[in-house]
Amino acid sequence: MTTAEAPPAETRGPVLVVGTGLIGTSVGLGLRRRGVDVLLADASPTALALARDLGAGTVPGDGGSPAPTLVVVAVPPDVTPAVARAHLDRYPEAVVTDVAGVKSPVVAAVAATGAADRFVGGHPMAGRERSGPLAARADLFEARPWVVTAVRDTSATARARVAGLARDLGGVVIDMSPDEHDEAVAVVSHVPQLAASLVAARLRRAGDRAVGLAGQGLRDVTRIAASDPVLWAQVLAGNAGPVRRVLEALRDDLDDLLAALSALDDLPPGGTAPGALGVVAGVVRDGNEGHRLIPGKHGGGHVEYAVVGVLVPDRPGEIARLLTDVHATGVNLEDIRVEHSLGRPTGLVEIAVAPAVRQRLVGVLTDRGWRAVD
């Protein structure tokens, strides 16, 4: 759907975005694309100027600007409560929301202001490994969950405005209590970040020859390990309790696995370790079951796709040519990823499709000169 065809925006400006990093600038870009007036504020003149120059909004001049109807606080998590409270005081007619990854501390801080009816916690479940305004995108929130944490004191009008903001930016509104949100993100976001970082940290001691063997599996597991350490320290400090509880449960699982591996490692020739292999296999089996719970395409149930691997020369235009040939088959491409071959001028492009059309796709691509591999 193009901008011209989109329904009118629910959000009425001006909207003040406080904090022009990745999320704040993306909010501004998305709202401006919908024709909403956006004002920008940031303690960093450089970040503020970059966001303005990128088209995320305007900077209020010395002559003043209209008071905002909605304030979006997009500052680091450790200062979010204070900034939210300050803007509730500064703009007594405005609804204030935030985008911090932890909700309970922010809601608790706002509760003491006497303006809790105008505050609605929010958390768009979207982001990138890169940070700052230059990494921002107007479509960052498209089809991503946007958690809204209205509480008993929240007015219906305030909740509706924040939900409208999320929808205008393409988000899918999910209502949760602050505590429910924090427990949920501990297991689906915060602990995965720590797990990726811990695995990636092992590579520092692995040696160049070992790291040179890395394949797509390691890249998948460690992709988010490139995230901002300072930001994550702030997030984890704000959600320490729920994260600790998940890690404690994970530690228990690791202890069981370590005991099984120790039993297998200590076996004499011809010996057995009853139950040990079952524990090891059980870890992988339980992981299979958990993986199937992750929502699939468009938020639906998990779907198993067939993968067609295609060897592609590593030169300009080859992937585009491959995708053009896939399009010509009429087969819907569900997912794609690229793995470069070690020491060879080729790459392996893995195309995920519905199992029923895999053979047809392989046949057509082979006829067009591509080499498909299992």
Image: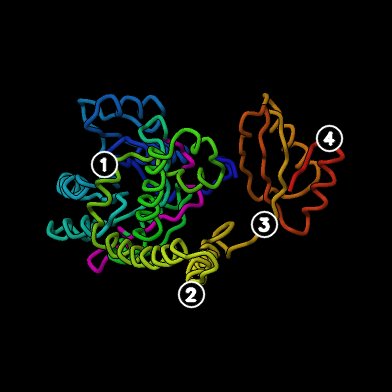
Q: Residue 46's quadrant in the figure? A: top left
Of marks 1 and 4, which one's residue comes earlier in the chain? 1
> How far is disc 2 from disc 4 in space, using C-alphas?
50 Å
| Span of residues in magenta | 136-158
Q: Residue at x 87, y 40 (%)?
A: 367
Percent position of residue 177, x then y: 31, 66
Query: In screen coordinates, is 82 left or right of 281?
Result: left
For mark 3, does the 10 Å Cα neighbourhood hold few (<14), some (14 to 19), or many (20 or more) residues?
A: some
Mark 3 or 2, which is nearer the eye? 2
Q: Earlier in the sequence, mark 1 or mark 3?
A: 1
Residue 280 is left or right of residue 22, and the answer is right
Residue 215 percent location from the top left of the image: 56, 42
287 lies left or right of 313: left
Crowd rating for badge 4 (residues with CA inside 10 Å; few <14, some 14–19, many 20+): few
Look at the numbered discs 1 and 4 and tell me whether their residues touch, using CB distance below 8 Å: no
Which amino acid type corresponds to the residue marked 2 in the rendered image?
Answer: Gly
Question: Which residue is labeled 3 in the image?
Answer: 305
Query: Considering depth in this image, is 92 or 177 the residue closer to the camera?
Result: 177
Which quadrant, please, contains the N terminus? top right
Residue at x-position 30% and y-position 64%: 248
Q: Label 3 to label 2, Cα distance in Å?
A: 33 Å
